[in-house]
Image (cartoon, rainbow, N blue to C red):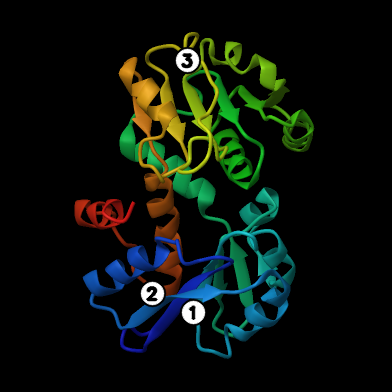
């Protein structure tokens, strides 16, 4: 694809008005001197099977897929990347040269890279990992941690059957534990991850006591509104290194942009500041 032809991409979801993705991708279009645009594609749940097949006809190179379409979109692809199939969800469509549609999931890549950006010597096998939540974000996080060599992943969710179902599906190293054991499940861990919505703006705080958490453990939250959740505040105050969800958002955007526009973009301080100004 020539950089001179107009490249069109976007984000499909319901709602999408709050998404920071247009800001990220349009920043890169400008930074790399490309001609193109990244737009909002608000598609109501019943309209997905009309909207997705129209992408190629409308001249799109692809789009991101966000809630509530990340699972349903899989059925509408001509081809699904192995990673997205394992995650049972997708977040990126790339229109192929022949007009067919291929689905990807870059959330796991984005998550792991955000940890490495914060702590370049981070290793998944440094010790046990505790993950809170069992939704779509947890699937991406748990699978990518397992792929990176995690030896023990303790999975806890308020509705225990969801955590157990994930543990059954993924097998070792994932073990489901009851939510009532969440405080004790922090003993001897090297990484704690919150993938629940608790602590997000407008949501109740995560009810978690950090007393058993080792001081060197990395504490990570996939939430980025607010940038520092109450969990991350509490962790920082007791001396733990922390990583917020902004790095995951920025990093998952990179392989998508590369697929659509032919440039692997960088995450610069200017981009971070531009996003943080909107949070």
Of labels 3 and 2, earlier in sequence is: 3
Mark 1: secondary structure: loop
Looking at this view, is 1 or 137 the one in front?
137
Residue 77, percent from left and from top: 69, 71
Q: Which mark is residue 261?
A: 2
Q: How many marks?
A: 3
* Residue 1 visible somewhere in the drawing: no
The quarter of the picture where residue 91 lies is bottom right
Of labels 1 and 2, earlier in sequence is: 1
Residue 240, percent from left and from top: 35, 19
Q: Mark 1 and 2 residues: CB-CB less than 8 Å, in contact?
A: yes
Q: State the quadrant of the N terminus.
A: bottom left
Question: For this view, does 30 lie left or right of residue 246?
Answer: left
Residue at 41%, 34% in the rendered image = 229
Mark 3: secondary structure: loop
Q: Which residue is mark 1?
A: 61
Residue 252, percent from left and from top: 45, 54
Mark 2: secondary structure: helix
Question: How far apart are labels 3 and 1 at the CA level?
Answer: 45 Å
Looking at this view, is 33 or 201 the one in front?
201
Question: For this view, does 243 lie left or right of residue 179?
Answer: left
Q: Which residue is mark 3?
A: 210
Picture layout, residue 18 above or below residue 172: below
Question: For this view, does 84 lie left or right of residue 259?
Answer: right
Picture layout, residue 211 above or below residue 4: above
Question: For this view, does 133 lie left or right of residue 249?
Answer: right
Question: How far apart are labels 3 and 2 at the CA level?
Answer: 44 Å
């Amino acid at each position: 694809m020539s950089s001179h032809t107009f490249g069109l991409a976007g984000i499909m979801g319901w709602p999408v008005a709050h998404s920071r993705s247009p800001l990220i991708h349009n920043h890169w279009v400008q930074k790399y001197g490309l001609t193109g645009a990244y737009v909002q594609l608000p598609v109501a749940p019943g309209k997905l099977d009309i909207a997705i097949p129209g992408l190629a006809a409308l001249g799109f190179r692809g789009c991101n897929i966000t809630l509530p379409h990340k699972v349903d979109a899989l059925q509408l692809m001509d081809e699904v990347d192995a990673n997205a199939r394992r995650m049972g969800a997708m977040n990126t469509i790339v229109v192929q040269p022949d007009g067919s549609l291929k689905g990807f999931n870059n959330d796991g890549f984005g998550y792991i890279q955000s940890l490495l950006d914060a702590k370049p010597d981070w290793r998944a096998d440094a010790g046990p990992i505790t993950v809170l939540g069992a939704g779509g974000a947890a699937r991406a996080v748990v699978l990518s941690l397992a792929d990176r060599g995690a030896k023990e992943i303790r999975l806890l969710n308020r509705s225990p059957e969801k955590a157990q179902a994930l543990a059954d599906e993924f097998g070792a190293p994932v073990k489901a534990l009851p939510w009532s054991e969440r405080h004790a499940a922090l003993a001897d861990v090297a990484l704690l991850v919150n993938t629940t919505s608790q602590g997000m703006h407008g949501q109740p705080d995560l009810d978690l006591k950090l007393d058993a958490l080792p001081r060197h453990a990395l504490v990570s939250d996939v939430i980025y509104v607010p940038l520092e959740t109450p969990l991350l505040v509490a962790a920082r105050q007791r001396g733990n290194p922390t990583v917020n969800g902004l790095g995951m958002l920025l990093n998952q955007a990179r392989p998508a942009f590369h697929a659509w526009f032919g440039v692997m973009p960088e995450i610069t301080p200017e981009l971070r500041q531009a996003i943080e100004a909107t949070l």
